[in-house]
Amino acid sequence: MGRIKNRIRRLRFDHDEMTQEELANRVGCTRQTIIALEQNKYVPSIELAFRVARAFGVPLEEVFQDEDS
Amino acid sequence: MAPLQKRALYSFVIGLVLTTVLIVVFVAQGDITAFERDLNLRLIMYAVLVGVPLIYLILVNLTLRKPTQLDERDRLIIERSSRAQWLTVIFTLVAWTIALTEIYQEQGQVPIAFLKLIFTSTLIISTLAQSLGILVGYWEMNRNG
């Protein structure tokens, strides 16, 4: 893993320091999955990735980036 | 700890306890035929067989109440652990078949108590294998991603 990086942690803080629990509830996953995402230990499905982007109100590519591109 | 991980840990501990109880009971009674002779032993076994799944269901209900407590990452881990579970069950049945065939080949019949033992052991091993698979799945995912 690690080719897909994300800015979830940064975006959470930019959104009134949203907690991992709050984000998890908004996107419909567990807090442990948010932790794994932030540590780049899990690459989410397209569906979850879109839900995360929607929760922050930003386009997908602002949350997830392909390291190779 | 994720709810599923918690449930797997509970299942694993319950499975180990049940295995220990079974081994202790059968060792204390001498051999497998004690099951056929001893009504008390049968009653203990039936109580264990009914009681343990009940406790398990209560724990599952407490740890995984809402459907949102299980997400895509958890489902991926369950899927992987199911493969390990299936293989373990097959190997258990193969081991039972070979062992009983070799031991009772000459007599031409196997004590009926083995039916219960095969069923119980397969059930326990299946639960243990899935729980262990889930716990290893989380550990691997946290280590390697």
Image (cartoon, grey):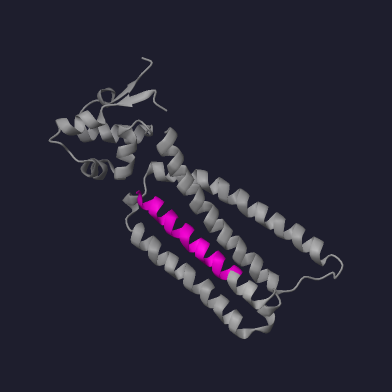
Q: Which residues are magenta?
A: B1-23
Residue A23: in magenta span:
no
Q: Classify the position of the C terminus of chain A by image quarter.
A: top left
Residue B9: in magenta span:
yes
Front position in the image: B86 or B106: B106
Q: Classify the position of the N terminus of chain A by image quarter.
A: top left
Q: Quadrant location of residue B59?
A: bottom left
Front position in the image: B30 or B101: B30
Residue A4 sits above or below residue A33 on the image: above
In the rendered structure, the answer to whether residue B121 lies left or right of residue B8 reads: right
In the rendered structure, the answer to whether residue B88 lies left or right of residue B9 reads: right
Residue A41 sits above or below residue B31 on the image: above
Q: Position of residue B136 (x, y in %)?
A: 48, 45
Q: Quadrant location of residue B65?
A: bottom left
Q: Position of residue B20 (x, y in %)?
A: 55, 66
Picture residue at 32% right of the left edge, 43% below the top = A32
**Residue A57 in sight in this render:** no
In the rendered structure, the answer to whether residue A41 lies left or right of residue A50 reads: right
**What secondary structure do most residues of the magenta stretch adopt?**
helix
Picture residue at 53% right of the left edge, 56% below the top = B128
**Residue B44 in sight in this render:** yes
Picture residue at 40% right of the left edge, 50% below the top = B5
